[in-house]
Amino acid sequence: MNSPSAGIEARAGASGGKLAEEVARRRTFAVISHPDAGKSTLTEALALHAKVISEAGAIHGKAGRKSTVSDWMEMEKARGISVSSTALQFEYGDCVINLVDTPGHSDFSEDTYRVLTAVDAAVMLIDAAKGLEPQTLKLFQVARDRGIPVITVINKWDRPGRAPLELLDEILDRIGLTPTPLFLPVGIAGDFRGLLRRGPAESEGAPAEYIHFTRTAGGATIAPEEHYTPEQAADQEGEAWTTAAEESELLSAAGQDHDQELFLAGQTSPVIYASAMLNFGVRQILETLIELAPPPGPRADLAGTPRVPADPFSAVVFKVQAGMDAAHRDRLAFMRIVSGEFERGMVVTHAQTGRPFATKYALTVFGRDRTTVDTAYPGDIVGLVNATALAPGHTLFSDKKVEFPPIPSFAPEHFATLRARTADKYKQFRKAIDQLDSEGVVQVLRNDTRGDASPVLAAVGPMQFEVVTARMLTEFNVETHLDFLPYQLARRTDATSAPELARQRGVEVFTRTDGAMLALFGDKWRLQYIQKEMPALTLEPLVATAD
């Protein structure tokens, strides 16, 4: 593996100019996986190796466990899972890393989907013992649909697990992605000694070197590395090395060597075995991302026209988040810069309203910590403070108008009414509902019958309701009560069909905040009956689903 800065200047030189150089330095990626595969631990380990923190936040032993720097919400700390995506920006060598740690539960798939609209690559994390899991498969399909190249990390190799080649076969068989390991483990799962770095394809699988790791106390600091030639490795590790070398040769014989064009085309995935908890293989992950993941490139606007990084400033908002810091009580809109140079204070245009938008308060973030940013470039993620007019999917631009495609909402499957327990909190209740709605934490549905005092919340998964009630209490001091509704699915309808649908048993019609009219049904059979008996009514599936 080359040094972190290798190839950057060469790629930038072709375009020339300060902007091109800065674009070439950027790597913007998300970490995706099934819950409990170690996403937040890996995020922390990557930050540790970049030397932006001195000690990893996750340590062994429940009694002394710390929350990771990317998990800032009280609910996340208590449960040890991520329920909200978090942006981290840091430098490694000559590169600027924009890393997004995504939620760790399938109920928050919608948040992960939004993140995948804002990145150029993804790290797919797989548990060495469990292999591919349902959430991993769903997220990979989203990445594939968006044309995002995927680097695979097989994590937790320090624990008992499956055979290396068995896991690779599963990737190939179940998702049709050809795995091309760059590093193979030396030692079986549970006896992780180090990594065999594979040579280039023309060497026919011959190992290039052996990287031996030494454990540190609790995995809280960077694991020391020792590098050996293949001959030295054979003397030191014996059969464990011989097995890894033979597996490398088998992979080459099967054509599973890295090819950059096939990787960028989404046909292959470089693979690294690692232990994020012990910090084994983490440096190799970082350097692989820098060497192989693409820098920011063109993005199609609403008309399908590519917007290239050298074009005038444009950005897309992919997330809105409040409550990250009780000391500030502000609301951050996270935007991914698509083109041009951003300068704090510049006045841009909000595409959805046509109104000017001042960017006086702009931040880069590291978990919940914030730093004022004066200049940013394509690929960077910037937080705009108190951007109350912005919502996920909105576009900001300078010069001629550009608008990027909206981010579709997922089809909700769980519904509940929410009300304040005491009437004197109604004002705070309304304010909180409006804020959580604008962030996309849940979808808020209303109709004349139920009124504003007890709006209906629609969610992909029930844990979203827990986030709502927890944040209502901690951020707005409003204690709330949920009543679950007997609906299971929603369909888009229109003003012409709504009156007739509202008269049907087991159906209720609402208007979502974005103006969409949704009809809720108790089950699929009720929906099928109405579609059969009244085919003229408008009942359309929502654009995006969690499936």
Image (cartoon, grey):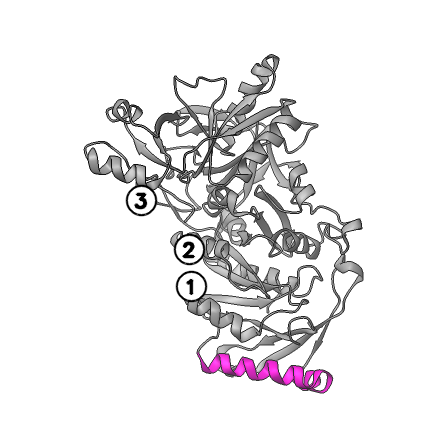
SS under mark 1 = helix
One can see residue 343 in this view: no
Which residue, given by chain and number where applicable, does mark 3 sit on? 304
Q: Nearer the viewer, residue 119 or 189?
A: 189
Measured in 3D between alpha carbons, the distance from the residue under mark 3 to the one under mark 2, in whole angstroms, is 22 Å
Which comes before the other along the chain, label 3 or label 2?
A: 2
Which comes before the other along the chain, label 1 or label 2?
A: 2
User: At which x and y percent is residue 253?
Assistant: 46, 83
| Amino acid carrying mark 3 in the image | Gly
From what the image shows, is residue 478 above or below residue 267?
above
One can see residue 115 in this view: yes
In the rendered image, the quadrant that contains the N terminus is bottom right
| Amino acid carrying mark 2 in the image | Gln
Which stretch is magenta?
230-254
Mark toward the viewer: 3 or 2? 2
The image quadrant that residue 410 belongs to is top left
Q: Do the residues bearing badges 1 and 2 touch, measured as CB atoms within 8 Å? A: yes
Residue occupying image coordinates x 69% and y 42%: 78
Mark toward the viewer: 3 or 1? 1
User: How dense is the environment of label 1, judged by Cα within 10 Å: few (below 14), some, or many (20 and up)?
Assistant: few
From what the image shows, is residue 440 above or below residue 419?
below
In the image, residue 248 lies in the stretch drawn in magenta: yes
Measured in 3D between alpha carbons, the distance from the residue under mark 1 to the one under mark 2, in whole angstroms, is 8 Å
Which residue, given by chain and number where applicable, does mark 1 sit on? 175
User: How dense is the environment of label 2, judged by Cα within 10 Å: few (below 14), some, or many (20 and up)?
Assistant: some
SS under mark 3 = loop
Residue occupying image coordinates x 39% and y 21%: 447
| Amino acid carrying mark 1 in the image | Ile
Task: Kindly give the residue lying farthest to the top in the view shown.
Answer: 424
Which residue, given by chain and number where applicable, does mark 2 sit on? 141
Q: Is residue 408 left or right of residue 93?
A: left
Q: Is residue 480 left or right of residue 116?
A: right
